[in-house]
Amino acid sequence: MIYDLTIRGAGIFGLSIAWEATNRGAKVQIIDPNGAGSGASGGIVGALQPHTPDRWNAKKQYQLESLLMAEDFWRSVDETSGLTSGYARIGRVQPLMNERGLALATERKTDAKARWGLAASWQITRDAGAWNLPSPTGLYLHDTLSAIVNPNHATKSLVQALKSRGVPILTKAPEKGATVWATGWQGLRDLSKHFDQDIGGSEKGQAALLRCNAVGRPQVFADGLHIIPHLDGTVAVGSTSERSFDAATTTDSQLDTIVERARKTIPILQDAAILTRWAGVRPRAASRAPLLGPWPNRPNHFIANGGFKIGFGMAPKIAHTMCDLILNQNNAIPDDFLFLLGKNISG
């Protein structure tokens, strides 16, 4: 078989680039020794949230465009696969804890209107979106740009959609055509060793999935917690951020603390049974931005990595950008994302 593109890594970046490439008529193979969604992309949280609309920069603009692309992206995947990704643009509610938080939220309304336009709103309200969610000020920040996806379901939907297009997902095979390295935190580690500079590494996260039907309510961000009402009648709560860890996929007392905090924040979770305890490792670039672009001094090889906590939110736009680069020789990668030696280091 002749392939135009080989993708190493079957996480959200690799699968999404493969999907976009097949939509453009490319022949694609994916190689991942551990199988699809075996890393952070097989998680359970799935909060697709924008950064604050003030202090605007290229990263926030790129993220905005990707979040706005997400609905069509996941609709086309799900229609092809016959499965569901769990995508829904349900918005987000956040209690305003003090006068300073209220002042910041008020100031950012103007920026949201200027940057988001009519695509989404940033509102201060007394409505907690049907949640019994305490707020010391009695007020909440509500944005309509935030969305959700069920990472595990979304990965399965992408895999099935790609299989229906004849895209194999292999554990081992020779590279053919151009090669994209979307190999997660291990790939960042290997790049750091290869180039002898701090390009990136890993951060562990833990989350839990509870049995609680809160469909129709917005997601919650409160007390540093993400509380995500999935469309299948479960609620995900998370997550930890651990730069130092021993066991990458083992849950521990830090997750117990997260669950307890969530139960105190959302009363209806107090008696909800825990269905899944999850832990995984996110690829965290030293620059804290996705790393995209040609592999320096290695012709026809490309890098797409560093999704960190926003991989699913960035994936639709990154897939489009990488296919523009590889298939059409059009480099539209923002300077902050472009992989350059000596640049993508901690600063």
Image (cartoon, rainbow, N blue to C red):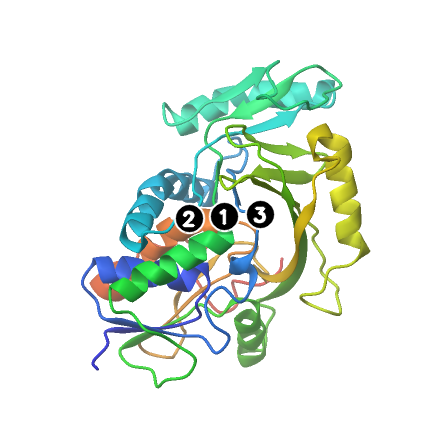
Spatial distance from mark 3 to mark 1, Cα to Cα? 7 Å
Tag 1–tag 2 contact (CB < 8 Å)? yes
Q: Earlier in the sequence, mark 3 or mark 2?
A: 3
- Residue indicated by mark 1: 150
Residue at left 21%, top 67%? 26
In this view of the protein, which residue sits in the foreground, 18 or 250? 250
Q: Could you say whether the residue bearing mark 3 is in a helix, strand or loop?
A: loop
Q: Earlier in the sequence, mark 3 or mark 1?
A: 3
Q: Position of residue 347 (x, y in %)?
A: 62, 57
Spatial distance from mark 1 to mark 2, Cα to Cα? 6 Å
Q: Position of residue 306 (x, y in %)?
A: 52, 60
> Which label number is shown at residue 85?
2
- Image height of 318 relative to 86, above or below: below
In this view of the protein, which residue sits in the foreground, 148 or 69? 148
| Quarter of the N terminus within the rendering | bottom left
Q: Could you say whether the residue bearing mark 1 is in a helix, strand or loop?
A: loop
Spatial distance from mark 3 to mark 2, Cα to Cα? 13 Å
Tag 3–tag 2 contact (CB < 8 Å)? no
- Residue indicated by mark 3: 45
Q: Callout 2, which amino acid?
A: Ser
In this view of the protein, which residue sits in the foreground, 289 or 133? 133
Residue at left 47%, top 72%? 35
Q: Could you say whether the residue bearing mark 2 is in a helix, strand or loop?
A: loop
Residue at left 46%, top 46%? 313
